[in-house]
Amino acid sequence: MTSSALSSIAVFGTRQSVWPVAAMLAQNLPDRIALTVVEDVSSGGRFPALSMKVASRFHDQLGINAHALVEHCGGRFGLGHDLVDWQGEGSRNFVAASGTLPKINGVAVHQIMLRAAMMNNEPEKLAYLIQPFRFAARAAMEGKLSLASDDPSSPLSLLGPTVQIDADGYAAYLSNLASGESANRLEGRPARILQSEDGAETRKVILDDGQEIEADLFIDTDGTLSALSLDAAAGQLEMPEALLPFDRIGTTRVPPGEIRHVRTRALAGGVVIETALANEIDVALLYSADVMDETAVHRIAGANMTPESFTFDALERPWSGNLARIGTASANLGPLFSADIMLMQEQAMQLVRCIPATRDMAIEATEFNRKHASLFSQLRDFAILPFALNQRSDPLWSAMRECALPDTLQTRLDQFRSRGRLVTFDNEIFDEQTWIETMIEFGIVPERYDPLADMFDMKQIVPVLRNLVDGFNRTIASMPDAS
């Protein structure tokens, strides 16, 4: 590979996969680098709806306002994910992004509540005692909705609202951002790749209509190029397949109902994710074909759903040579917590930061792959957390609890069980408070509390805690209804 200046980039993928990457490149590449976007219009499958944080670095970098996404992508605002039946039939655990709760003289609220529970020899009541302090989750479960406040003294500053939007509408919106002369747009599906003899360098991509695409850097956003490539050196990151025993996915749409946020129901053979949009509800069913037959699928999701095969996986080195794999070409995490779109957005921003000055991309690829591994592990660990901590009695779910966990997640759980503190890593994607509340909600009770909590006279601390909860109560009562 020569050391001359990089002058051209070609991006390949379906409508839903290609435009998040192409839009970011189109707005950030220098004029000297030509951008070609090849959209595969032959893929007609429906993609699950998306749920993304309003406070998004990706959208900020593109100059996108969350209200515009809701308006143009058939969406609505939400507050998080309502997990139903994960702890047994009738259970409900709301996972909401949350800013950090105010500490009392430097001690976290959950540590004080843990001391109170242990003083009464009832540590198992920690989740019950912490519930009044879960402002974002309480607001959602009481049917309220608001955007976050910039005022740090307001409880509304704890909210992490989301936008729930149609995936195809989102792709169209991003496509418009790359309008004009910033990108050369083509339609077609890669049919063949011409590579160097050792497979280390991609030289040309031939589309199904015969068009030939040449570039210095090729970007695969849906896995099509990778399937044609001779490069087998990408490796695999750790994905606990037994913990995610689902191999089919399908989507459909139903009329609007009482759902206002994202509801994920645990089923005997899988999960069904229902995302409230402006005028309908998107239904995504992720399941095991060994447990759930076609009759059961149609009973849950209707006869219009056409399931497809699905595999959880992740590459260790998605950027090799002059081929960079992004989004589902690099990893499949599924629609849970919209992990796939979060991965793609973070990778697109990292790609822009890594675009090399020359065609020798080894340094940039190494840094991209390092960031990819860290990002993937965070998204994977949070996505599988509810599965690892579920309390369902049916065989598929019971088996999940016995699975070995990735070291990073096991370390977080062990440390929190031991002393109620969360181990954090560089560039955390999910808020620390969200991790803490989710682990407590799913039954983790630390073995000991922060020794600093012993400095409080518990009778004197009660009014302080009550004032905090009263402020939450007043704010929630004044919030508008989610409808």
Image: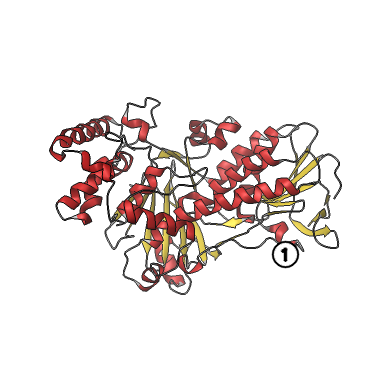
Q: Nearer the viewer, residue 94 or 239?
A: 239
Q: Nearer the viewer, residue 243 or 2?
A: 2
Coloration of the structure image? secondary structure
Residue sitting at 16 percent across and 33 percent down? Answer: 463
Residue 198, horizontal then vertical, whole percent: 83, 62
What residue is pinned by disc 1?
232
Residue sitting at 61 percent across and 54 percent down? Answer: 328
Q: Amino acid at mark 1?
A: Ala
Q: Quadrant of the C terminus?
A: top left
Query: Is residue 265 shown left or right of residue 116?
Result: right
Residue 308, horizontal then vertical, whole percent: 56, 64
| Quadrant in which residue 283 is drawn | bottom left
Q: Nearer the viewer, residue 464 or 97?
A: 464
Query: Exactly how many numbered labels are in the figure?
Result: 1
Query: Is residue 239 shown left or right of residue 144?
Result: right
Q: Secondary structure at mark 1?
A: loop
Q: Nearer the viewer, residue 466 or 324?
A: 466
Residue 341, horizontal then vertical, whole percent: 55, 47
Residue sitting at 38 percent across and 45 percent down? Answer: 434
Q: Is residue 43 above or below residue 169?
A: below
Query: Is residue 426 shown left or right of residue 482?
Result: right
Residue 225, horizontal then vertical, whole percent: 72, 57
Query: Is residue 245 shown left or right of residue 470?
Result: right
Observer able to see residue 456: yes
| Quadrant in which residue 359 is drawn | top right
Observer able to see residue 483: no
Other-residue count near label 1 (Cα within 10 Å), few / some / many at <14 / 14–19 / ≥20: few
